[in-house]
Image (cartoon, helix red, strand yellow):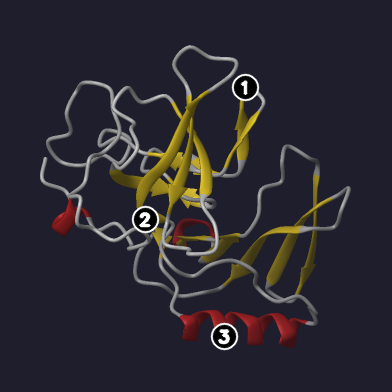
Amino acid sequence: MIAFFNENIGNVLMLVVADNHGEKLDYERKADITRVFRENTGETVAWNFFGEEFTKNGEITLTEKQIWKLEDDLADAGFAETIEGEVHSNFVVAEIVKMEDHPDSDHLHICQVNVGDPERLVQIVCGAPNARVGLKTVAALPISLMPNGTLIFDGELRGVASHGMLCSARELELPNAPQERGIVELAPDLAPGQAFDAETMWHG
């Protein structure tokens, strides 16, 4: 889940909770809340809350208490839905556990990545020349907002499913980012699944 606040267009809090996969969108408004949903399935992809108050514009991190308050607002407005989506950071320490060549590319790799969930590995397609088994790096998991404004969703690269992106220092706009191509290389002792903290984990 990604949360944006914009005071310039009427103090609107926008929550992006799903990918619309390019499908046509529709919306319904009750009181000061608008639900944006896929026309073909009815799946909610975003919520707009009007008249909210936050201390900064742009992406914000919501606490669980703030989420509960927004869900109370939904119920008061007459919506039966709840807010779906993870509250924690979607930029996490990731370890490449397995890697194989993409069958339709001479430079892409299909990586199986440990992001801290003992039950499953996450498949991410990556073209970085320094990608290798055992590397600790940064994964942007769905749904993440990159510094350049790009939203990361589940997708495909040349027909192979990819559930996020392994990030370079330049893509994350980290200080002293190297100019050569390649994903971030983190200290090998970092545990997969930790929220990425540039101040303590990046030593560019």
Q: Nearer the viewer, mark 3 or mark 1?
A: 1
Q: Nearer the viewer, residue 15 or 9?
A: 15
Q: Is residue 71 visible?
A: yes
| Amino acid at dot 1 | Arg
Is 109 left or right of 153, judged from the image as shown? left
**Label 2 packing within 10 angstroms: few (<14), some (14-19), many (20+):** many
Is 1 left or right of 195, judged from the image as shown? right
In the image, is residue 78 above or below residue 160? Answer: below
User: Which callout, 3 or 1, points at the residue further toward the start of the chain?
Assistant: 3
- Using the numbered discs, state the Cα–Cα distance from disc 3 to disc 2 in whole angstroms: 25 Å
Q: Residue at x 69, y 71 (%)?
A: 33
Is 116 left or right of 12, judged from the image as shown? left
In the image, is residue 149 above or below residue 142? Answer: above
Q: Nearer the viewer, residue 120 or 74?
A: 120
Label 1 residue SS: loop
Q: Quadrant of the N terminus?
A: bottom right
| Amino acid at dot 3 | Trp
- Residue 61: x and y in percent read 41, 68
- Residue 108: x and y in percent read 47, 22
Residue beneath disc 1: 158
Residue beneath disc 3: 68
